Amino acid sequence: MLRIPDLGRDFMEWFSKNLPYLLAGVSVGGQYALIAIGYTMVYGILRLINFAHGDIFMIAGLIMIYASASMPMYVSIPLVLIATVILGFLIERVAYKPLRSAPRMSVMISAIGVSYLLQNLALYITGGLAQQYPAIPWISDTIQVFGASTKRVTVITPVLTIVLVIILVALIKYTKIGMAMRAAAKDFETSQLMGIKINSVISMTFIIGSFLAAVGSLLFFTNYTGVTPTVGAMPGLKAFVAAVFGGIGSIPGAVIGAFIIGICENIIKGMGWTTFSDAFTFALLIIVLIAKPTGLFGEKATDKV
Amino acid sequence: MTKKKAAVINVALIAALLIALYIMEQILPPTAMVFTVLKKGAIYALVAVSMNLLNGFTGLFSLGQAGFMLLGAYTYGILTIPVEQREFVYQYFDGGIVKFTVPVVVALIAAGAVAAVFAYLIGLPVLRLKSDYLAIATLGFAEIIRAVFQWDKLGPLTNGSNLLRSYPTFQSVLYPFIVSGICIAIIVMLINSTYGRAFKAIRDDEVAAEAMGINLAHHKRMAFIISSFFAGVSGALLAMYQTTIQASMFKSAMTYEILLIVVIGGIGSVTGSCISSFLFIIFSEWILRFLDNDTYIGSFHVPLLRSGFRKVVFSVIIMVIVLFFRKGIMGTREFSVQGICNFFTGKSRKKKAVKGGDSND
Amino acid sequence: MTENVLKVENVTMQFGGVLAVDNMNIEVNKGEIISLIGPNGAGKTTAFNVITGVYAPTNGAVYFNGKKIIENHPQGKMKKLYQGENNGKYSSVLAPTPDKITKLGIARTFQNIRLFKSQTAFENILIAKHLRRTSNLFTATFHLNGKEEAQMREEAEELLRILGLEDVRDELATSLPYGKQRRLEIARALATKPELLLLDEPAAGMNPQETDELTAFIARIRDEFGLTIFMIEHHMDLVMEISDRIYVLDFGKPIAAGTPDEIQNNPRVIEAYLGGSVDE
């Protein structure tokens, strides 16, 4: 009988010791979720791993730095969102649309090319130096949660993420464009035959994905302060893993996958295994791909002989 | 023109090339830019061809090349740092745990072998995956390998996140040419063998290939292991060229660069990969260099030109190739003496075949 | 017990809740030409895919030359879902991959032609010679298998000649006219040196004249290569003319079997064809 309270106390002890990591995990998870949605939506429709998505996220960070240097926050934040959306839209139009009928590999290579271009562009603009991310008032403030001090963004992120996801899911479920998106994800060719304007659906997908990535970047860099040209690559890949983990094409799946990855990664950091926090994500990816390639919520696809 | 005659011409061309390189080395100062380009180009040619064997000839879209190069580089370094130097190299790890050295040639082969063993192990789970999932899984493995090699606990072996250095390197430009040349020649011979045909069958149609009695798992694994072996060797060569090894060199960006080389050269063309490797290096390291320098014409400051602009222009060029010249320089064709002869005599070549593909290397 | 080349025993193939093939029994004797007919969606190609190892059957067994080559029984989720017959009759699992089946001596063609598209006609055939190799990776790479390589090439040339494809030897497979593509696919299957050849709608998309040619062609290769042929076909002229026996499949269930005459007068067959989709 004595063991149960013991366990409870052990857990409380573990909990309070790991609280900062758990909080960070939930927060990072929310940020990954915002990026992961872009991956999962694009993959759902185009069957394309948009390698450039992580770099769009990075560019959003850079835009914020340069915008806030000369403009007040209430101008620069909307500007970041708009500019990132335009960037995502343009990338799709220039680099992916011409390859619509090309083999999947060509489009993926094009995505890698865009990623390479964006990174080099960032390198050129910043001169290779890490840029200081501005402190956004209110969300950068330090607060106390269960006795652990943290930035307010840590608490805001999961809430904001969930609100945005609910809006997005409603959008996809109840609006006309959302219905078109679902149709295109189900069967690309047939939906085209049914009169769905596939190009505007795809553009919309990129617009939503980029918008969420921009929001994600505002939250992410508030915690991490430095923007370098390659800073987007890792969160991008992790968000992709989250999308695969949740079942690619599924938005709730991507969000849940992102939170799990964010939390696990930070607990691993808390255990002093920082070197392996990245490796863990990929190990998870490989395990998921082998054990259940359709992920947690994915639909099964079969090949016809 | 008979096969034999073509072979003789190819051998003669290779000999002429090597002699020309030798003469160049005698005339030009060893610091000349041309040698940097040639050395690096030869190394990249090998890794690009090894990637092409997988992506272009077997149809396996793998992005693990940097990871296998890392394995090769580290294996080479660990096995060849002179014993008396180890104390200084492994200064934080009591001189490391490896207390012997092996000859350079053995170390080069071991570099390939270690990469091949890892490829075998990684291939067991990932080769069952399809196209883009395979790509992301191999990319993931490369990242895991990189993290593991930087791990402090493995320091006595890998020197953690510190540099490996003081191992034997090469001076002459002939060295990477000969090693890469031999390796590429072996890959070409493989592609021309019955196994190479089986690889191409898998690329064209997996279902049909299996129905024709080709064991998919076995052949995919074989291609993966062989490709990784040569990636390992090229990693060792790169280590020799750079004179230091650090795990952070082998990021996924490196794999992307190699992939872009393969694409520019033509997916499925060995000679295309070789040509584009040299072009890639020439452009990125040499010709476009001026873009990185502040330039004044009279008192006019040429806009945009400053550090980093070269890479921007370079990536734009790559995007143009990817978008508008999707077949790359060579498509799936091969550069060969016979092809040129036929071109000049006006004979059309319906059939493509890899013949002495290293003639331009 | 008569020695048959192929024996399909109680084979059931169920996808989720759909019975694609339901308790199928087929016997093919040496030297016969057997046809499998039935309306679209009757499960004919699925049956082929089971025999060639593409799918492991949900239940049942397949024998080749009296030796069991495939066997399976409902497992996992299927234990509950299974709707077919003979549950519990089979207990072991034998599910070789398609390449193993081909190696045993069963070759096939595909309904929707699947040639190696970047390869020439000659190379397509040469690739199929790969499975009978004795060379290993090392000897093949370093061209130490010259004799075998030469023999492979010679056999491939000969197949081209026998099948009348030598004039398109160096054409890309996909640039050939349709009839020749079909023929090349058969040549490629023959290159694996099969005893049993499975043809999946060899006359699909052919006009009556081409179909006549194909009829003669199938009979000819049967004699010339000492083959047993099992085919799926919709062209009734062809089927009735060359089949020794015919099996009829409807909704996954075998509804009739017999000689062409017997089948033509079988009321159940007539009903299946007139009631189902009409292919002729």
Image: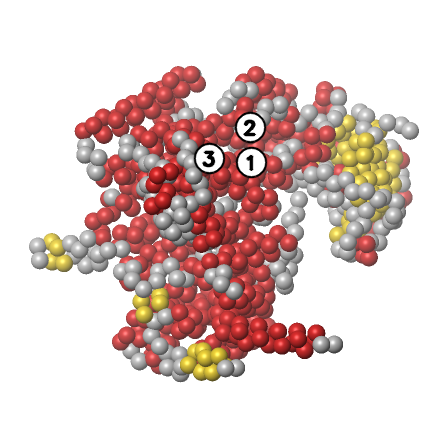
Q: Which of the two marks, 1 or 3, is nearer to us in this view?
A: 3
Amino acid type at circle 2 is Leu
State whether residue A266 is above or below residue B264. Answer: below
Residue C192 at what x, y percent from top left? Answer: 66, 27
Asked if residue A99 lies left or right of residue C108, the reply is: left
Judging by the rendered image, the residue that carries numbered circle 1 is B222
Query: Pointers 1 and 3 in contact (CB under 8 A)?
Result: no
Between C143 and C248, the one nearer to me in the picture: C143
Q: Is residue A299 visible?
A: yes
Q: How many labels does the image show?
A: 3
* Chain for numbered disc 1: B
Asked if residue A227 lies left or right of residue A249, the reply is: left
Amino acid type at circle 3 is Ala
On residue C137, the disc is 2
| Quarter location, residue B287 | top left
Residue A281 at what x, y percent from top left? Answer: 52, 59
State whether residue A57 is above or below residue A20. Answer: above
Kindly report the distance in space between the C-alpha atoms of the residues bearing marks 1 and 3: 18 Å
* Chain for numbered disc 2: C
Query: Pointers 2 and 1 in contact (CB under 8 A)?
Result: yes
| Quarter location, residue B278 | top left
Kindly report the distance in space between the C-alpha atoms of the residues bearing marks 2 and 1: 9 Å
Residue at image x 66%, y 44%?
Answer: A305
Quick one: label 1, few (<14), some, or many (20+) residues within 10 Å?
A: many
Q: Is mark 3 on a helix, strand or loop?
A: helix
Judging by the rendered image, the residue that carries numbered circle 3 is B110
Instruction: Tell me, yes or no, whether dots 1 and 3 are on the same chain.
Output: yes
| Quarter location, residue C218 | top right
Between C249 and B34, the one nearer to me in the picture: B34
